[in-house]
Amino acid sequence: MLELEHTTKTHDESRQGEALDMLATGKSTGRKLYIESYGCQMNFSDSEIVASILLDNGFETTKDYKEADVVFINTCSIRENAEQRVRNRLKEFESAKSKNPGMIVGVLGCMAERLKSKFLEEEKLVDVVVGPDAYRDLPNLIDKVDDGSKAVNVLLSREETYADINPVRLNSNGISAFISIMRGCDNMCSFCVVPFTRGRERSRDAYSIVKEAQDLFQSGYREVTLLGQNVDSYKYTAPAAEGEEQKPTVNFAQLLALVAEVSPELRVRFSTSHPKDITDEVLHTMARYDNICKYIHLPVQSGNSRVLELMNRTYDRAWYMERVDAIRRIIPACGISTDVITGFCTETEEEHQETLSMMDYVKYDFAYMFAYSERPGTLAAKRYEDDIPEEVKKRRLTEVVNKQQEHSLYRLQNFVGKVHKVLIEGFSKRSDQDYCGRNDQNTMVVFPVDERFKPGQYVHVLAERCTSATLMGKIID
Ligand code: SAH
Ligand code: SF4
Ligand code: F3S
């Protein structure tokens, strides 16, 4: 397994989430929900909506699936191994269910959408299959299972954004939160299953987003990350009430500004940007607000124009480089990260070299790197042969990973000796003698605890040393 597991967790399909112990509303029925999430941050964010819907229906949450009445697994289909992981996990639930036959097992998310009722045939322990746009129907579906039948709802919607549902923050540090600003994707990258599992793109009510950010800030949160598959195509027009004037459309740059205005003490991040759509207006907005973090995730996928065309990414190498130049010009200190796929259909050795040379050009701060995995139903699966042998994909991946390690180290070494504004997120993973938090560019910084400062506060940290993933230093306030 060469895929790099990493720390910012935008779309790392190996993460698991558990619900917090004993969250409940006033009208608890004592039934317990356990929910576990895989895949991108959208899924983690959706699980918070699911928990909110079930808490409203009398459920409590539990951290232990063995004592749960309802076990949900929120799944990812992005690569074959993401699906395999879910299948393995379901096997583990099987023995718990055999001891507790009343336990309801539900599959949510992208795999549910992709496989639909086939899931019920393939995995006998599954009682309910629910796609990403059907979560409001969960209480009703659970009732059906209580009555002795299996239940499926995989309808996709053109409107659903769950805008009015207040997510229950699961596994939260109380400092940073994710806000979904849109759902679905209208791009048709040929390798990608997301348009099929998440449906058409739709943007959430801008005012409900700002309100969520305000509420989070008031409850002590200091960082929000705005989430969408392609945030640059965010576009919201409020429906005009009768006799009222039409309100102007809010684009992504304007939404960023609205959220940044909530408070200068609230950090704003976002993911994912699409190279074809990221505008100078967005870059200028980032430059204008100190509290919009100077960090852009700009997936390149490949550095070669022919491969990009086969991938249907709708930009070429020169366009991508121009966007990187624009970022460097407008926001000189901006961190840039990326996603890379190696061994896409027909990729030659020379074309692979162009991905490596693109990496040299940008010197990414960070990258998520994957060997191409053919997904059933995608354009690439229909049109092209998955003809690059597994060993070649993996060898190219190793080259990409090694190159990225050099660049990550290079970026971090450049941070050493400089002072970084860091939002304290909590104790470091290794020791409660140390705090950790991120700088503007999303790099993890670790430094000794100073009693004067608490998680949720900003401190200035002088970086003294680094590894290829972490800066180490001390508070200088
Ligand atoms: N919306 C984001 C990406 C979402 S999927 C974007 O457009 O960039 C996250 C990443 O998974 C993609 O950027 C891509 O690098 C990777 N990925 C998607 N489908 C894949 C596949 N079939 N095989 C390997 N990697 C894939
Ligand atoms: Fe997939 Fe492309 Fe949409 Fe990203 S932009 S989710 S890679 S189809
Ligand atoms: Fe996300 Fe995986 Fe679905 S990356 S959108 S959970 S296929």
Image (cartoon, rainbow, N blue to C red):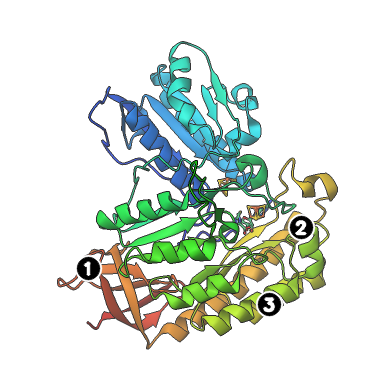
- Which quadrant is the C terminus positioned in? bottom left
Q: CA distance from mark 1 to mark 3?
A: 43 Å
Q: Nearer the viewer, residue 440 or 246?
A: 246
* Residue 14 visible in image: no
Helix, strand or loop status at disc 2: loop
Other residues around mark 1 within 10 Å, as few (<14) / some (14–19) / many (≥20): few
Label placed on residue 433: 1
Label placed on residue 312: 2
**Residue 332 screen position, x and y as percent:** 51, 84
Check the image and report above or below for 381 versus 334: above
> For ligand 2, which image quadrant applies?
bottom right
**Residue 380 screen position, x and y as percent:** 78, 50
Q: Amino acid at mark 3?
A: Met
Helix, strand or loop status at disc 1: loop
Looking at the image, tell me whether mark 3 or mark 2 is earlier in sequence order: 2
**Residue 408 screen position, x and y as percent:** 52, 76
Q: Amino acid at mark 2?
A: Asn
Q: Which residue is mark 3?
A: 321
Tag in front: 1 or 2: 2
Check the image and report above or below for 353 versus 456: below
**Residue 271 screen position, x and y as percent:** 52, 60
Q: Nearer the viewer, residue 291 or 388?
A: 291
- Which quadrant is the N terminus positioned in? bottom right
* Residue 128 visible in image: yes
Q: Nearer the viewer, residue 273 or 281?
A: 281
Q: CA distance from mark 3 to mark 2?
A: 17 Å
Q: Is residue 184 left or right of residue 305?
A: left
Helix, strand or loop status at disc 3: helix
Q: Quadrant of residue 262?
A: bottom left
